[in-house]
Image (cartoon, helix red, strand yellow):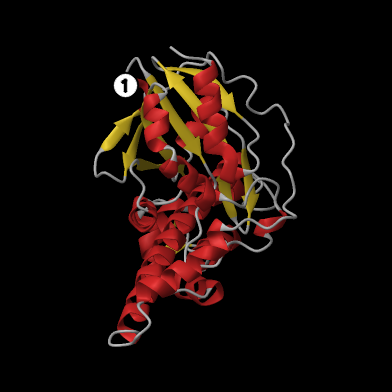
Amino acid sequence: MQISELACRAGVTTKAVRYYESLGLLTPERLANGYRDYNEHDVRLTREIRALGGLGIPVERTRPFLDCLTAGHQNADDCPASLAGYRDAIEELTVRIEGLAARRAVLVARLQRAAHRGSHVSPDNEEEGLMTDYTDLPADLPVPEDDGAAAHLPGTKVPPLELRGTGGTAVRLDALGAGRTVIYIYPLTGRPGVDLPDGWDSIPGARGCTPEACGFRDHHQDLLAAGVDSVFGLSSQETDYQREVVERLKLPFQMLSDPARSLARELSLPTFETSGLTLYKRLTLIIRDSVVEYAFYPIFPTNEHADQVLAWLRENPL
């Protein structure tokens, strides 16, 4: 069939078909007169490119799906490489969603300030009221069980991984120094004007990131006095989102951003999925001389966790 018929049947333009060919995604045969000759397989490949494009997967990244069809599989996502393509697309969407959520929160904050400008109710006071929902823990939260997912961590070498910090520089985890560093890892922090994922309170150990952060803030000087060189929070949220939390909660330490969950892969850290997101399970690492000295897991209740870490440090002095 000619290019115009292929384009019509696949629901694309002839210009798009030529672009697919330029990328090597379509390889029609040539007739004796030099014209391209397309077949039913080309129609199927073109339709697949169009369908994937509707899901946000760029044309340039459809090759694994097309190769899967060309190899004879019934579906374009029957192959491991296709599943990896889905994961990459989901990861990119997650980063974009978090970025949009951060921008939305900034707009909400500006709206509150503008709406209360000249009013007897200050936006700061209103914000404090909104924060109460995140700092107060419900009494009936489910208690997380120890599934052994962190049992392998003590004695594990920290990988040479650099993560972006809210202080504006990258922090290399295997170069934290010979002293003790506390890294508390959490799924995500909520904030005023931004909804938490559906069913958040029903997930064991999910609720309580803000109380946990406030605990480390309030005990920061105690932790340093107990021999800790540095404290970091770490999540898969973007740095801009984390920076707002640091500023709003007045945290005296940095947050580290790991949107790709690289540390989870390097150390086999536990994660969970909810609302299309893959998030860290809550745990805390005591790192000394580039080695995990101790791991707190599971953690409950979160508003008492800084006290638990401080007690362990005092019982295990350097």
Q: Is residue 255 visible?
A: yes
Q: Position of residue 162 (x, y in %)?
A: 33, 32
Q: Is residue 41 above or below residue 82?
A: below
Count the labels in the image. Answer: 1
Q: Secondary structure at mark 1?
A: helix
Three-letter code, disc 1: Ala
Q: Is residue 42 visible?
A: no
Most foreground residue, 318 or 261: 318
Q: In the rendered view, would you say 225 is above or below 212?
A: above
Toward which corner of the image does residue 260 lie, by quadrant? top left
Name the residue at 40% across, 51% down.
24
Residue 17 percent location from the top left of the image: 42, 66
The residue located at (64%, 43%) in the rendering is: 301
Write down the quadrant of residue 139 in the picture: bottom right
Tell me the crowding category of disc 1: few under 14, some 14 to 19, or many 20 or more residues within 10 angstroms, Cα based: some
Residue that appears at 30% across and 83% down: 114
Residue 205: x %, y % from top left: 66, 45
Per the image, the residue denoted by label 1 is 175
Q: Residue at x 46, y 48 (%)?
A: 214
In percent of width and height, residue 193 lies at: 47, 71
On screen, 228 above or below 30?
A: above
